[in-house]
Image (cartoon, grey):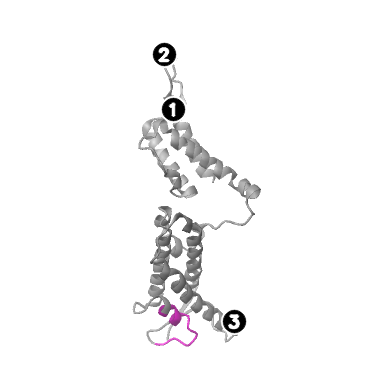
Amino acid sequence: MRWATQEIDAFLHVTDQVVPDSSGGMVYLGTVMRGSGKEASERAYVVEQILDQLWGQSWRADKPSQDTEWSRLRDQASRGKTALLRQQEIREKLGNGAPDMDAGKLHPWAWETGSSLWRSSHFNQAVMAAATRVNAEAQAKLGRMDVSETRLFNEAFNTDPPKAGCPRLRIVPDDGSQTYRDIHRGARAFAEGIYAALRNPTAHQVATPGDEHLALEHLAAFSILARWIDEATVETV
C-alpha cells in the first residue's frame, strides 16, 4: 500500500498546476504543469495499473479521448489513494468485518493464467483458463497425456496401488488409516465435482459484471485442487 500511495503522490505532484517562476523578469499568465509531459505520461501509466488493481476496468468507463491537464486521472488517483489509506476503516465502519479474498494469493495455477482475462472483466473465461491449467499441470506431473479432467483425477487419487502407465497422486502417505482413504476419496469427488459443475457449465456461459464474486469462488475451488496436486507425491510401480 505504501508504494502505491507514493506512486499516486508522485503523479499528483508532477501534474499539479503551478504559477511559473517569474524571478527572471518574465511575467506569465495562468499556470503550467509542474513536471514535463513525458514524466506525467510515465507516472500516469503506473497509476492506471494501481487503479485497475483497485477497481478493475470500471473506473475507465467514459474515459475522455483527451484528459485535459490530467484532470480526470488526477481525480481518480485521489480517490484511489483515499481507498488505499482508508479501506480498512471503511470496512470496519460499514462492513461486517468479514475478511476479503485476495485473488493474488490463490495458487498460481488458478490465478496467473487467467489474471489478464480477469482484469478485463472476462471472469468466466478466467475460470476456464484455471481449469485448463490445473488439468495440464496434473497431466505433466503424472506423465498422463492420454486422459484428462474427471478420468485423470479419478485415477490419480485412486487408493489402489499404481499400475504401469497409471501412477497415483498421494496427498498424504499411506499409513493404512481411514483418514488416508477419506482424504483421497474426497479429493477424487472434489475434482470430479468442480469439473462437472463449474468448468463445463462455465464454457457455455456469457459473463456479466455481477459474476465477479461467484467466479472468484470458483477460482478458489480450483486453487484448492491445484495445491493438492502441486504438493502431492507421485507413486509409481
State the residue at coordinates (45%, 44%). Answer: 59
Q: Nearer the N terminus, badge 3 or badge 2?
A: 2
Mark 1: which amino acid?
Answer: Arg
State the residue at coordinates (41%, 13%). Answer: 27
Mark 2: which amino acid?
Answer: Val
Location of residue 133 with respect to 177 vertically, above or below: above
Where residue 116 sits in the image (x, y, percent)? 40, 55
The local crowd at label 3, few if under 14, some if 14 to 19, many if 20 or more residues have their Cα within 10 Å, is few
Q: Is residue 153 magenta?
A: yes
**Residue 116 appears in the rendering:** yes
Mark 3: which amino acid?
Answer: Thr
Which label is found at residue 94? none
Asked which secondary structure carries label 1, the reply is loop
Q: Nearer the N terminus, badge 1 or badge 2?
A: 2
**Residue 168 appears in the rendering:** no
* CA separation in Å, label 3 and label 1: 67 Å
Where residue 19 sits in the image (x, y, percent)? 46, 21
Location of residue 54 with respect to 13 vertically, above or below: below
Q: Which residues are drawn in magenta?
A: 151-163
Location of residue 231 with respect to 71 vertically, above or below: below
Which label is found at residue 34? 1
Q: Which residue is mark 3?
A: 179
The local crowd at label 2, few if under 14, some if 14 to 19, many if 20 or more residues have their Cα within 10 Å, is few
State the residue at coordinates (50%, 85%). Answer: 159
The local crowd at label 1, few if under 14, some if 14 to 19, many if 20 or more residues have their Cα within 10 Å, is some
Asked which secondary structure carries label 2, the reply is loop
* CA separation in Å, label 1 and label 2: 17 Å
Q: Nearer the viewer, residue 211 or 83?
A: 211
Q: Is residue 220 magenta?
A: no
